[in-house]
Image (spheres, rainbow, N blue to C red):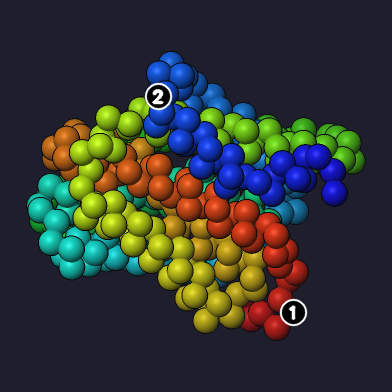
Amino acid sequence: MGIFERLNRLFPVWAVLMSAAAVWRPELFTGFAGQIQTLLAVVMFAMGLTLSQQDFLRVARAPKPLFVGMALQFVLMPLAALAVSRVLGLDADLTAGMVLVGATSGGTASNVITWLAGGRVALSVSMTLASTLASLALTPLITWLLIGQSVDVPVWGMLVSIAKLVIAPVVGGVVVHHLAGARIRSLEPALASLAMAAIVLIIAIVVALNAGHLAVLGPLVALAVVVHNALGLIGGYGISRLLGFDLRTARTIAIEVGMQNSGLAVTLASQFFSASAALPGALFSIWHNISGSALAGYWKRRPAADDASARG
């Protein structure tokens, strides 16, 4: 095993260590806040380098996992958020924040986690794109249905953001892969290490930016976020397996469903509800990266060959 493979297997360790450093000395990381989008674009380009046109054609020829993942994204996660909030007795503002987290699309970080976990990256990217576009209508509708308030989604801003962070970098990477596929394959471990370093830095920046909120977040809110994330991961995986999908596909759907676009949830909560309504999204943005990286490390040590008996 090469040095890059060894480094990649320790992904959750680096995430936890950098998160601890960000809590201890947030000023070391907050200055990089403006670089988060650039870091994500670099990561998405690196992932695109490992994808071929055939990867996406396979997803198009077998769309069932995409539709199942989308259904879980916009049914399981919002209902789980509302149920957890009601069981734990969260107030109206915190419940609104939880529902917003559940009603948003999958986050771009899920694509990175899927890649590092050995999942189906093309499926993950396709789910992120599809759920982001669908969220333009579904996020306000679901929020209104569950908590009785309408939320205006910044349509143009979201479209520009997803184009910059996902579509353009991934397409660019796929084009380069098409032109120099043989050379790129030999660099894949190093590319994974680059992605790991970027996502760990992103985690540290998010933790640092929210360091002031961590001290005031009550245990109930922390518990709500952890349980909500776990329900998404477990539900996404379990339902996918029950439907007959192979291990790699089930892992991909689990990660995509469990990891939300919490940055969007924070923005909407702050704009349309209150500062306290943004707290669940702020904590979720930290926790889902840590839990996702830990899960990626666990699954990376247990490679999943395609399940020949899978029906999906």
Residue 299 in sight here: yes
- Quickly name the residue at label 1: 308
Residue 113 as seen in the image, left or right of residue 73: right
Could you say which disc has been placed on residue 182 in the image? none
Give the mark nearest the N terminus, 1 or 2: 2
User: Are circles 1 and 2 on residues that touch, CB within 8 Å?
Assistant: no
Relative height, residue 94 to residue 299 (above, below): above
Q: Residue at x 62, y 29 (%)?
A: 42
Spatial CA distance of label 1 from label 2 is 48 Å
Dot 2 corresponds to which residue?
Answer: 26
Instruction: Give the percent coordinates (x, y) of residue 244.
Output: 59, 80
Q: Quadrant of residue 249?
A: bottom right
Callout 1 secondary element: loop
Please name the amino acid that badge 2 sits on. Pro
Left or right position of 230 against 242:
left
Q: Residue at x 74, y 79 (%)?
A: 308
* Residue at position x 31%, y 54% in the image: 225
Callout 2: SS: loop
Q: As rendered, which of 149 and 111 lies closer to the eye?
A: 111
Query: Residue 138, relative to residue 240: is it above or below?
Result: above
| Left or right: residue 310 compared with residue 257 | right
Q: Residue 22, how many percent across, how many down?
A: 44, 29
Residue 166 visible in the snapshot: no
